[in-house]
Structure formats: C-alpha cells, structure tokens
C-alpha cells in the first residue's frame, strides 16, 4: 500500500445557535468562517479523511497539495513514524507551527483512518483501546447570549442529557466583571452537581484572569481553559499558584515541545492536545504519554469531536470530550452517520478507521471556490 494523492479544499457553512432566531455564519465565533477538508488516497483505492479549522485555510491547502504530497508520495501510509520523520526533516526542520502543523494534522489523521480501514479496527483501538466511549461536555455559552438567555441555554442542554457545560469568557464588553456575573448566574441556575468550565481563548492578561478567578472561585469550576495571551506558560504557572481553579490548555499548540513547556512549567492541571492542530494522532499520542508521566489527564478543547474522540478513548489518561455545538453541526452535515452522545457519553463507531462516511453532496455544497 502506498500514498498516491492528497486532495484538500476550503469549505464554509452556517449553523443554528439554540435560542437565537437567525443562523450564524461559519461554525462559532466571528472568525470561524472556514474549515479545511482533506482526503488521502492510496494506490489500492483506500482513502482517509480529516478536518481542521479556519487558520490560514488556503495556505494549508497549498501546503498539502504542493509541498507535502511530493515528500510523502509512494510511502506506506501505515509507517507513520517514517512519514513524520521525513516531513519534519524536509518541511519543518526548525519546529515551526501554524500552517505546517495544520497540514501535518490533516495528513496524519487521514493516514490513521487508512490504517484503521486496512486493519479492520477503529483508530481508538489502534491507539490503545482504553475504552469504547467517553464522557462529553457541551460548549453552549455563546457570546451572543445575554445573561437570561445564557441560563436558558444551559437548562436546554441539561434537558438533553448533558451534565457538563462550558461557556466562553473574555469577549463581553463588560469585561471580567460581566463574565463573573454570567458564570455565577449559570452556576445558580444549574446547581452544584453540574461540571462547569470556562474558556478565555487566550484573551485575558494575567491581571484580568486573576481578578476573574478570585470573583468565581466559589462557583467550583471544573477548569479555566486558555486563560492568558499566547498560552504564556510562565504566567499561567503563576496564575495556577494563586487560584484553586484548575487550569487547562494546549488545544492550539502545534507540536509536542510547546505542550511539554506547559507541563514542565507546571502551568496546567489538564493537558489538551487537539489532533486537528497538534500534528495529528501521532503527535497527540506522544503528548498524552508525556502527560501520563506527570500524572495529568488529557481532555479535549478546540472542537472537532468526531476526530478527538479516538484520542480520548484510545489512551489511558483520556478524559472528557468537547461537544462544540458549531463544529458538531459541521460534522453532522459532512458525516451523516456520525455518532451522537447518549446520556452524556459518546461511543466510538463500530466501523474501521474513524468510522465516518462522507456526504459528497454536502461536501460540494459547502466548498469555497
């Protein structure tokens, strides 16, 4: 079996946000308009698929088709360490991130899909098969909600069987004080038995994050995700030393060395490698093993749950998966047989590879010319 071709394309769509009357362009925040779809084909007709997000999407397509393909063509898709070694040496010898990490993520995910199909086993099984399903938390707290709608949206998700919720902070015009009010309102509405997470998406200064932590420590948050600009590991370690709220980060880091910095600086309680950005399953597995050495769990942030499901199910220290409502709708549109949570848990499909079937009509309809 040999790699024959890599095809990539940019896509966009609209989503429904619960309790809002109009559809939202893209799949989440203002900048999340586009995503990249990738398909890798072998000489015997087996194909693998992958997705990644909006970051420099057109450059990712060019990187895959014009730079990655000449490097990996005719290699065995199952020899993933050899493929990564050649890619690193040929295309990224100085360990840069960004476009090259997103492109490598797409290639690697698709190759694991091929590897699973060839072996007749799921990617989760090939990664280690630690479990067949994982708990799920739902990212419901869109910034478009006012406080009243936010608490109603939280109750709506509880009614659908979720017992863990995450809301976005650091984007409201009212600053950290409004964030504190929104968090405390949700906690009061859902009670103490529900896991509640918050995500600042890198947007706070250390001072702002510290103010918010002090204001909401009594809300018993499960974690505070990506609190600081640039995932500054030094400053996050300082914040972690001054709050009882567990910190989580890592979902947008492009390789194992950045993830290692978060661990060795003691900046996080939960590590969050995301296969769609960190270099795929091959790199995420290394990050997970690193976290195991330090007795840290890996959890999921950054979206694309249909792919990251396999990491958390396959590896010993896998924990809880993000069910991001926007990216979930993208997945359900492109993959009509995608699994859905039952009683707050998501099962690994009983089909080989990623267990996903592409809706070609939906793929064509969402493609950006």
Image (cartoon, grey):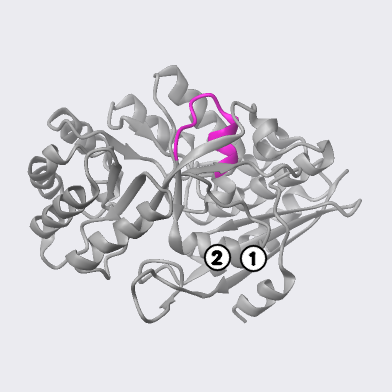
Number of marks drawn: 2
Which mark is on residue 54? Answer: none
Quarter of the image with the N terminus in it: top right
Q: Is residue 210 visible?
A: yes
Looking at this view, name the residue that lies furthest to the front: 159
Residue under circle 1?
334
- Label 1 secondary element: helix
Q: Residues within 10 Å of mark 1 (few under 14, many from 20)?
A: many
Is residue 286 rendered to the left or right of residue 38? left
Q: Which span is picked out in magenta? A: 309-320
Q: Position of residue 75 (x, y in %)?
A: 81, 43
- Which residue is at the front of the view, 322 or 92? 322
197 is higher (above) or lower (below) than 40: above
Labels 1 & 2 near each other (Cβ < 8 A): yes
Q: Position of residue 200 (x, y in %)?
A: 26, 52
Residue 178 falls in image quadrant: bottom left
106 is higher (above) or lower (below) than 193: below
Give the residue displayed 56% in from the left and 28% down from the top: 315
Give the residue displayed 44% in from the left and 32% down from the top: 298
Q: Position of residue 76 (x, y in %)?
A: 82, 40
Is residue 112 rendered to the left or right of residue 42? left
Give the residue displayed 48% in from the left and 65% down from the top: 54
| Magenta stretch encompasses residue 354 | no
Residue under circle 2?
330
């Amino acid at each position: 079996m040999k790699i024959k071709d890599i095809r990539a394309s940019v896509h966009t769509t609209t989503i429904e946000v619960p309790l809002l009357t109009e559809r939202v362009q893209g799949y989440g925040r203002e900048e999340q308009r586009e995503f990249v779809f990738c398909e890798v084909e072998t000489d015997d007709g087996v194909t693998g698929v992958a997705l990644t997000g909006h970051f420099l999407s057109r450059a990712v397509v060019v990187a895959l088709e014009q730079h990655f393909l000449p490097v990996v063509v005719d290699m065995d898709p199952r020899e993933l360490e050899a493929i990564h070694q050649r890619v690193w040496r040929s295309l990224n010898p100085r360990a840069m991130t960004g476009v090259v990490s997103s492109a490598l993520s797409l290639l690697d995910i698709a190759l694991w899909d091929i590897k699973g199909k060839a072996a007749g086993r799921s990617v989760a099984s090939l990664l280690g098969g630690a479990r067949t399903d994982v708990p799920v938390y739902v990212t419901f707290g869109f910034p478009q909600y006012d406080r009243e709608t936010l608490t109603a949206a939280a109750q709506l998700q509880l009614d659908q069987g979720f017992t863990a919720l995450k809301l976005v902070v650091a984007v409201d015009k009212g600053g950290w004080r409004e964030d504190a009010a929104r968090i405390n309102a949700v906690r009061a509405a859902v009670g103490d038995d529900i896991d509640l997470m918050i995500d600042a998406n890198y947007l706070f200064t250390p001072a702002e994050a510290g103010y918010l932590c002090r204001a909401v420590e009594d809300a018993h948050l499960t974690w505070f995700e990506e609190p600081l600009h640039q995932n500054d590991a030094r400053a996050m370690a300082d914040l972690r030393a001054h709050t009882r709220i567990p910190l989580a980060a890592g979902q947008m880091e492009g390789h194992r060395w950045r993830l290692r910095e978060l661990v060795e600086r003691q900046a996080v309680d939960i590590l969050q490698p995301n296969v769609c950005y960190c270099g795929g399953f091959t790199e995420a597995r290394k990050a997970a093993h690193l976290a195991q050495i330090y007795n840290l769990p890996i959890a999921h942030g950054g979206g694309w749950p249909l792919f990251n499901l396999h990491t958390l199910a396959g590896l010993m220290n896998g924990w809880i998966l993000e069910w991001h409502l926007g990216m979930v709708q993208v997945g359900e549109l492109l993959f009509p047989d995608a699994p859905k949570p039952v009683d707050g848990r998501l099962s690994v499909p009983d089909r080989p590879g990623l267990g996903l079937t592409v809706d070609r009509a939906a793929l064509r309809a969402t493609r950006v010319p």
